[in-house]
Image: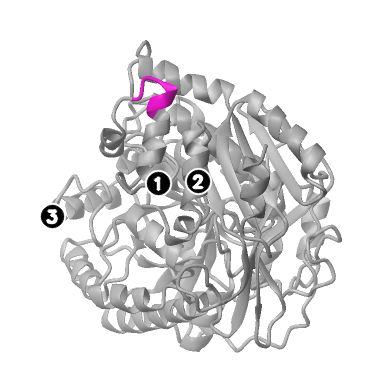
Amino acid sequence: MKLIDKISSYNSSHPFYTFEFFPPRTDQGFGNLLPRIVRMANLNPLAISVTWGAGGNTKDTSLNLAELTQSEYRLDTILHLTCTNMEKGMVDEALRAAKESGIHNILALRGDPPRGKEEWLPVDIKFQHATDLVRYIRSHPEFSSSFCIGVAAYPEGHPDHLADEETELNLLKEKVDAGADFIITQLFYDEDRFISWFEKVREKGINQPILPGIMPIQTYQSFARLTKLTGSKVPLQIMSDIDAIKHNDQLVKDYGVELAVKMIRRITTETDIPGVHFCTLNLEKSVQRVLESLRWIGYSPQVVPNKLIEEPTSEHVLPGTITPVSAASVAALGLINIPASETEAGSGELNKADSWDDFPNGRWGDSKSPAYGVQGPWGNNDAVNQGTISQWGNPKSLEDLTTIFLQYLHSEINTTPFSSDPIQNESRLILPHLQRLTEHGWWTVGSQPAVDGVHSSDPVVGWGPRTGYVYQKSFVEFFCTEEDVRMIEKKVAEKGDGWVHYYAANSKGECRSNVPDDGRNAVTWGVFSGQELIQTTIIERQSFLAWKEEAFSIWLDWASFYPPASQERKLLEGVHNERYLLNIIHHDYKSKEALWTFIFDA
C-alpha cells in the first residue's frame, strides 16, 4: 500500500512511526536481520525502509531485502533509490524490480559522492538531482501511477554545505512540485532548529507530511562518526552530557533513549508532524525502549533467552539471497528469539535475541550481527579526501608510506587512509611495538593490547556497565609482503604452540589461515553484575574477509587522487596489487607481552 494513503487513513491516539534498515555486510548478518525485522514488525510500524548504497553498491541486497519484507513478510516497504553512479538503464531496472516485488514506495535521493570523492558528479545526465529522479518517475508511463514518492530534507542544511537555508527550502519545494508525496528528514539533535525549520517549510507552502529522522544514540563511536558524516549540529549541552559518559556504553545507550523520547515529545507537541522515522542502525532494543517510554506500545513481555540463528548453509546466487521457503520459515517462528550456531564462540551461553549485539565494542564486533560494521572499520569513506591527502604529502616510495604511518603513531598527523580519527589512548599502551612494526615496513591498521580483568570503568580500555571486568586478547593487523606472510606462517608452525592464530589475504582473493573455517576468536569480552558473559569483538574468517575488501579498496581510493602515470599512483596501486593484509592473534591474554615477544623474537 502507498505510504501517503496509509498516512491519510491513519487513526490513532499517537503519531505513527517507521523503521529504517540497511543491508548487512555479511550473509550471516543478513540472515539474522530477517528475524529482527519481523520481531520489530510486532511493534506495528506504519512502514519500513531499506537503504540503497552509494552507486548501487548494495543494489542486489537492497532489492532482495526489500522484496522479502514486502512480498514475504507483507510489510509496506520504502525502497531508497539514489542517482549516484546510476548508469543509463539502472534506474529503470531498479524501479521495475521494485514494482514486480509489490513495492509501492520509493525514497528518491541524489545520494552521496562515491567513496574517495569530495564532489558529486552525475553519471547519467538525466539524473543530477533528486528532483530529476522524482520527475522521471512521475512522468514515466510504466511507473507514474505505481509509486508513492518520498524525498529527503535537511533541517540543518545539506552535508555538502553548498547552499544557504533559503536555497535549500527552494530546492525542497522543487522536489515537492515535481511530484513528491512525503518528506523524511536527515537525522538531527537540535529540536529548536528543527521546529524553526519546520515553520519555514510550511510558510513555503509545502504541506506534504514530514517525518523527522530520529536516531537514538547507540554508542559514542557511532554517534560521533554519523553526526560528522551527516554534518549534524549537535547542541553543546548534548555534547557535554555524552562526553561525560562516553566510556560507559550502557549509560550512553540509556541517554540515547531518554534524549530521543524528549525530542519526540516536544516536536510532536509543537508541530503537526504525523509520525517519526527511526534510523535503527539495524538494532532493535533502543527503538523499542523509546516507544515504550512514549507509551506508544505496551511493555515487552518477559522473554526466555534463546540462541542465535545458524547461518544458512545453502549457496547464495546473490549476496543475502535466501529461498522463499526459508524466508517463510523465518516469518513463522514467532520470532521473539533466534537460535545460535553450535560453532559459535561461547556455545552454550544464552543471549537475548533483541540485544545480544547491543555493545559492538572495538573495531570488529560480530559479523553475525545485522549491525556489523556500523562503527567498525567501515564508514571511513571520509578519511580519503583532498584535505587529508594534503597531510600525507605525495608518497613516491615504500619509505614514504612508512613515514606517513610513523607520523600518525607519533601524532604528527591526525589521520591515515585507514583511520579518520587521531590515535587512541588504547593504542598508546602498545605504541613502542606498533612503532617497531611500522619501522620494519609493516604498516599497522588495527591492534589492541592484552587486558586481564581490568575494571569496566577504566577510561582507556573499559566499556559496558560500570560493575564488571573486561578482558582482551592482543592482536595486530598490518600490510606486508607475501614473503613476510610465509615467515609468520613458519614461525606459527614452529613456535606458536597453539597460542597464535592468523589470517592473511590479498586483493586477488587469496586467503591463508591456521584457523578452521568455522573457527571464531573472541578477543574482547566482559563479565558484569547480573548479566551473561558478553563477547563484543570476534575475529573470524567472514569478518576478516569483509574488512579485507574494504581495506584494499582504500588503497585504490587513495591512488585515484593522483594522475594515472604518476609515481604516487603506481606506488599505491602496487601496494593494492602485491601486499597482504595480515592479522595475528595471541590467545594468552594474561601476558601483555606474549604477542610482541612472539613476533619480534628470532
Circle 3 residue: 166
Q: Is residue 583 left or right of residue 160?
A: right
Any mark on residue 238, and which? none
Query: Residue at left 52%, top 72%?
Result: 462
Disc 1 residue type (three-letter): Leu
Q: Which of the 4 quarters of the picture holds residue 336?
A: bottom right
Circle 2 residue: 434
In this rendered view, identify the residue nearer to me: 267 or 142: 267
Query: Residue at left 56%, top 21%?
Result: 577
Q: Secondary structure at mark 3?
A: helix
Percent position of residue 525, x then y: 66, 68
Q: From the image, which quarter does the C terminus lie in?
A: top right
Dot 3, how many residues are within 10 Å of its Cα: few (below 14), some (14-19), or many (20+)? few
Q: From the image, which quarter does the N terminus lie in?
A: bottom right
Q: Is residue 305 left or right of residue 101?
A: right
Q: Secondary structure at mark 1?
A: helix
Circle 1 residue: 409
Dot 2, how many residues are within 10 Å of its Cα: few (below 14), some (14-19), or many (20+)? many
Dot 1, how many residues are within 10 Å of its Cα: few (below 14), some (14-19), or many (20+)? many
As measured in the structure, the alpha-carbon distance from the residue carrying label 1 to the one carrying label 3 is 44 Å
Percent position of residue 275, x then y: 41, 73
From the image, state whether disc 2 or disc 3 is nearer to you. Answer: 2
As measured in the structure, the alpha-carbon distance from the residue carrying label 1 to the one carrying label 2 is 8 Å
Percent position of residue 293, x then y: 49, 87
Q: Earlier in the sequence, mark 1 or mark 2?
A: 1
Q: Which residues are magenta?
A: 395-400
Disc 2 residue type (three-letter): Leu
Disc 3 residue type (three-letter): Glu
